[in-house]
């Protein structure tokens, strides 16, 4: 039983790691049993989602997302929790779960993204700090550890609103479609995790795993608007695309995701 358990859960959790893939329930989240608080984001199969068989909690500790000629390092851990059915599939979450909005600082800031050096004179370099946040752009597909598809969009944010509130790379109609694997993808090779099993609580733990994708394409920027003096809008989509090398075809982009996870039967979390 334990030998089959890791493969099934790892495939489902792969989507959870990047990013990624939560659909929040409108119901009030139940409280997990003592010792299972890390699974608070998992829907209760009794009152929230009867299809949930396994609860999971995961963390992407480090890695990168390279789009076009720009790379963002993952330095702020991305935490995600939810639940899956007995054979994997879509990941669902209670109101307490989902994907953390972990803002990653982008090297070079707004000027590096747009090439508009005069913005530093107008606003000051400290006002041009840039952050990137990965968000779900569609429904993820989870079959096995070698078959994980995750559609994303990257929200580009600046504290002074230089890019506007809706500046993204990718969208629901044109997502960044990741196909993650612990094997080989393009020039990258991942790493299967190391498993541990906590017998007292029956929690499966996976540590030091690495997912990669070196073959996905990157779409164009959209919704990026600079408003000068509070009333003069300037669309920056084409400027960002030109400076950042977007859209970019397969072989140009890549991602590496170093992760750990915990998973357990839902009926133990909600007895």
Image: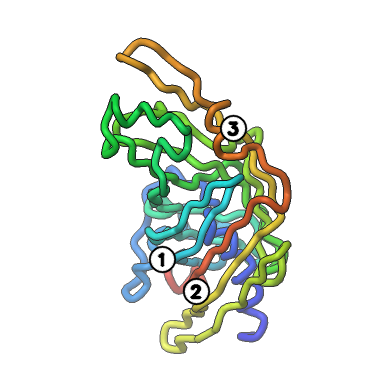
The tally of labels here is: 3
**Label 2 CA crowd tier, 10 Å (few <14, some 14–19, many 20+):** many
> Residue 39 bears which disc, if any?
1
Q: Earlier in the sequence, mark 2 or mark 1?
A: 1
Closer to us: 221 or 7 = 221
Q: Residue at x 50, y 74 (%)?
A: 264
Q: Which residue is mark 2?
A: 264
Left or right: residue 32 compared with residue 208? left
Which one is in front in this view, the residue at disc 3 or the one at disc 1? 3
Where residue 43 appears, x then y in whole percent?
46, 57
As measured in the structure, the alpha-carbon distance from the residue carrying label 3 to the one carrying label 1 is 43 Å
**Residue 201 to residue 238: above or below:** below
Label 2, label 1: how many angstroms apart (C-alpha)?
A: 9 Å
Judged from the image, the secondary structure of the residue bearing numbered disc 2 is strand
Where does the image place residue 257, in percent across and percent down from the top left? 54, 64
Q: Residue 39: x percent and y percent? A: 41, 66
Q: Is residue 71 above or below residue 144?
A: above
Residues packed near mark 3 inside 10 Å, few (<14), some (14 to 19) or many (20 plus):
some
- Residue at far bottom of view: 199
Marks 2 & 1, CB-CB < 8 Å contact = yes
Residue at (53% x, 61% y) in the render: 17
The foreground one among 117 and 24 is: 117
Q: Which residue is mark 3?
A: 242
Q: Name the secondary structure under disc 1.
A: helix
């Amino acid at each position: 039983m334990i030998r089959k358990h890791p493969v099934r859960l790892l495939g489902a959790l792969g989507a959870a790691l990047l990013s990624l893939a939560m659909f929040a329930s409108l119901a009030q989240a139940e409280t997990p049993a003592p010792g299972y608080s890390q699974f608070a984001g998992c829907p209760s199969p009794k009152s929230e989602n009867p299809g949930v068989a396994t609860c999971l909690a995961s963390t992407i500790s480090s890695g990168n997302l390279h789009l076009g000629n720009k790379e963002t390092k993952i330095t702020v851990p991305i935490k995600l929790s939810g639940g899956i059915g007995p054979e994997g599939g879509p990941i669902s979450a209670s109101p307490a779960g989902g994907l953390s909005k972990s803002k990653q600082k982008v090297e070079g800031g707004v000027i590096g993204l747009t090439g508009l050096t005069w913005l530093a004179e107008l606003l000051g370099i400290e006002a041009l700090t840039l952050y990137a946040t990965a968000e779900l752009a569609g429904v993820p597909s989870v079959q096995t550890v070698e078959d994980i598809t995750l559609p994303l969009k990257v929200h580009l944010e600046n504290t002074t609103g230089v890019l506007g509130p809706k500046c993204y790379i990718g969208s629901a109609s044109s997502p960044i479609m990741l196909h993650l694997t612990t094997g080989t993808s393009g020039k990258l090779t991942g790493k299967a995790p190391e498993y541990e099993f906590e017998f007292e609580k029956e929690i499966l733990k996976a540590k030091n795993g690495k997912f990669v994708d070196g073959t996905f394409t990157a779409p164009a920027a959209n919704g990026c608007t600079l408003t000068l003096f509070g009333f003069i809008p300037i669309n920056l989509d084409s400027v960002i695309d030109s400076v950042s090398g977007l859209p970019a075809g397969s072989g140009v982009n890549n991602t590496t995701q170093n992760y750990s996870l915990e998973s357990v039967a839902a009926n133990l979390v909600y007895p």
